[in-house]
Amino acid sequence: MNHNAMNKNIEIEFKTRISEETYHKLLSDFDLENNVFKQTNYYFDTDNLDLNQRKTVLRIRSKGPHSFKLTLKSQHEQEAYEFHVFLTKDEAEHMIKHGFNTKDYFEEFDYFVTFKTSLDNYRAKTPYERGTLFFDLCEYCGQRDYEIEYEVDHYEEGLKVWYEFLQKNHITQTPTLRKSERALMCILNK
C-alpha cells in the first residue's frame, strides 16, 4: 500500500449557518460567483459510530478526479487537530467500496471503518484579515444548507475579526453542527 507522508495541522475556525440569500450576497460582494468549486466529503465510521461519539471525523475529500485526501480530525475546545494522507484515486475508490483499517494510516488509531455517507460542498474562498473566509453550499441526503467558515492561526485575534465581519454584514451568529454530523444525522434518522 502506498503510504504518502502524513501531514498534521491545527485548525482554528469559526462558523455560522446562513441563508441562501446571504450566501449569494457574499459571493457577489467578494466577487466570487465564478470561483466556486465542488469538493465531495466521504465520511467513514465504525458500525457503532465510535468516531462520531469521540468527536472525531474521518473523511476522504475529493477535489476533482485526481485529488484525494484522507483526513482524521479530532475536535478540542478552540481548535481541531487534523492529520492528512494523500491517496491515489484507486486507493480512495477501494476504501470507499470496501472500508479499511484506520491503523494502516494512523498508527495510534485502530478501527475498521466503512463508508457511511457523503456531502457535496460548493465552496468559494478568499483571504480576509490574516485568515481565510469560506462560503459553503452543502448538499447531503436531499438537503441543502449554507454556512460561512473563517479559518485563522490565532484564536483571540480571529474571534475579534469574526465578530466584526458578522456585524458589518448584518449576520447573526447561528450555531451549526459540523458537516460530518449533519451528513451522519441523515443515516441516524433513517
Image: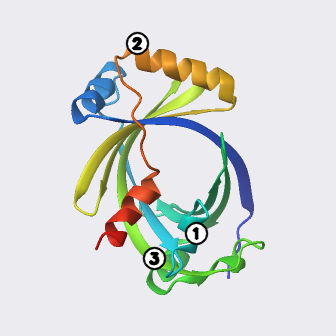
Q: CB of mark 2 within 8 Å of CB of mark 3?
A: no
Coordinates of residue 53 in the picture (x, y in percent): 56, 66
Q: Secondary structure at mark 1?
A: helix
Give the residue type that dot 2 points to: Lys
Say which label, 2 or 1, has the lower sequence index. Answer: 1
Give the residue type that dot 3 points to: Phe
Residue 178 to residue 94: above or below? above
Other residues around mark 1 within 10 Å, as few (<14) / some (14–19) / many (≥20) = some
> What is the C-alpha distance between the residues marked 3 and 1?
13 Å
Residue 32 to residue 95: above or below? above
Q: Which residue is mark 3?
A: 115
Give the residue type that dot 1 points to: Leu
> What is the C-alpha distance between the residues marked 2 and 3?
40 Å
Other residues around mark 3 within 10 Å, as few (<14) / some (14–19) / many (≥20) = many
Q: Which residue is mark 2?
A: 168
Q: Which residue is mark 1?
A: 51
Quadrant (top left, top right, bottom left, bottom right) of the N terminus: bottom right
Residue ID at (45%, 76%): 115
Quadrant (top left, top right, bottom left, bottom right) of the C terminus: bottom left
Q: Quadrant of residue 28?
A: top left
Q: Is residue 63 visible?
A: no
Q: Is residue 181 visible?
A: yes
Q: CB of mark 2 within 8 Å of CB of mark 1?
A: no
Coordinates of residue 57 in the picture (x, y in percent): 56, 62
